[in-house]
Image (cartoon, rainbow, N blue to C red):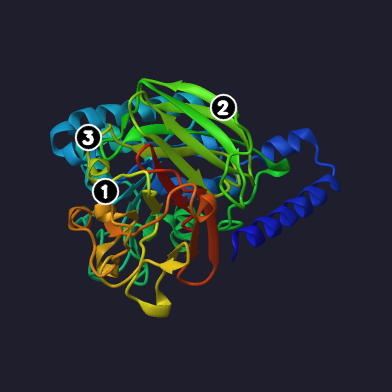
Amino acid sequence: MHTSRRSLLSVLAGVALAASLSAVAVPRAAEAAATPTYRPVIFVHGSAGSAAQFETQAKRLASNGYPIDIIEAHEYDSPNVATILPQVYAGLDARISRLLAATGADRVDLVAHSLGTFVSQAYLNSSPERAARVAHYVNLDGRPATSPPGGVPTLAIWGEGDPARAVVGATNVHLPDQSHTQTVSSAESFTEIFGFLRGRAPHTTRIVPQLFGAARVSGRAVLFPSNVGVTGATLEVYPVSPLTGGRLSHRPAHRLSLGGDGSFGPLPVLATARYEFAIVRPGAATHHFYFQPFLRSDSLVRLATSEPGEGLSGLVETSDRHTALTIQRQKEWWGDQGDAGDHLWINGRDVLNAANTPRAKRTIGIFAFDDGSDGVTDLTAPLPEFFSQTFITGMDVFVPATPAHLGLVRITVGQRGGGYEVINVPNWRSSTDRVTVSVDDF
């Protein structure tokens, strides 16, 4: 369903719910007694991942009553995980202790994906004391096992691939039509996760917009893929026009310095508005991040960037003539599945195909820029230095920079399964600015 229609229906549902609640007088004591308790939920991401993979499910949990501030992600430097496991485990110990002390809960619930299942299984098996502090474990499309890790009750969800994969003795659920990252973010996996954690079906799998439209967002600016915090930078947040992506004010709604682990917020926002987050650093291109409406409070926002000239960003060709885009979604892009796949139009040209986004590639991040700075788009083959990276592809797409092409880039997403999204962003010059667009995975 289109975003605007989802938002309208959700708002109407919220109004109806509020009206029904106001019509019934509930004694304060009875109301308190009926208030459900929730265990903290900790998400452990996979290779090259971050908290962003669990962002949608966190909002679905919140739409079903979970306090957003007890849903956290345990992030780590996944390329170097083999050498830092003791530090990862010590950090997870400290996180669990802090959450238990803050909430008074008896235990936490642990959810892991892909490489994160290797980390989490080893953690739970490392000592009975660690396993005793975890009530439920969810193993998302990752490592099989001969028994539930640490003896903790386990739900294992598996996507496309070998149907024989299992955690023996666990509840195993197979979603053969879902791709690797999709098993983290889909409504179907949410239904299974919620039922396992709470013992009942969720009231909704939708993200219900925040009542009265007021939300708060927080997160981290991090270096990809290490998840090290960005320091020595300024974060500026601007409300933007949905028609052009242009800033609605020359002055940012929020401006703050980034240091330490790159944390920011919570920042007040309008739940149904659109925003630009800009990382400004001396001597570096300004990195602009554009989001679809947050809909409700969000504590897992991640702004993934790189040091100037380093990583994949250092391979992006720049000029005054073209815009450089990174487009990401926590659900794989399928460019070789015909009507059963996805479409991504950039200024009217569908850029996905069997060469650059085959289903088997499991692409969630797309780098699109004018390779060779020749003003020509060539989609016959992916850019090899990007395509060789896990979950990433690169394509030669000429996107004219300002002032050409009406000062904007029109990005249209045709979601597999139905529905279209339109995201307009300014066509910044790649010589001075970079653009990342986050597309909803629901």
The residue lying at 44 percent from left, 44 percent from top is: 428
What residue would you read off at disc 2? 254
User: In this view of the protein, which residue sits in the foreground, 224 or 298?
Assistant: 224
Residue type beneath disc 2:
His
The residue lying at 54 percent from left, 68 percent from top is: 419
Q: Position of residue 352 (x, y in %)?
A: 35, 67
| Horizontal side, residue 92 vs residue 87: left or right | right
Residue type beneath disc 1:
Thr
Residue type beneath disc 3:
Ser
Q: Position of residue 161 (x, y in %)?
A: 25, 69
Q: In front: mark 1 or mark 2? A: 2
Q: Residues under labels 1 and 2: Cα distance?
A: 37 Å
Residue 127: image tag:
3
The residue lying at 58 percent from left, 48 percent from top is: 293
Return the disc, 1 or 2, that comes first in the chain's sequence.
1
User: In this view of the protein, which residue sits in the foreground, 437 or 33?
Assistant: 437
Q: Residues under labels 1 and 3: Cα distance?
A: 16 Å
Q: Position of residue 153 (x, y in %)?
A: 35, 50
Return the disc, 2 or 3, that comes first in the chain's sequence.
3
Q: Quadrant of the N terminus?
A: bottom right
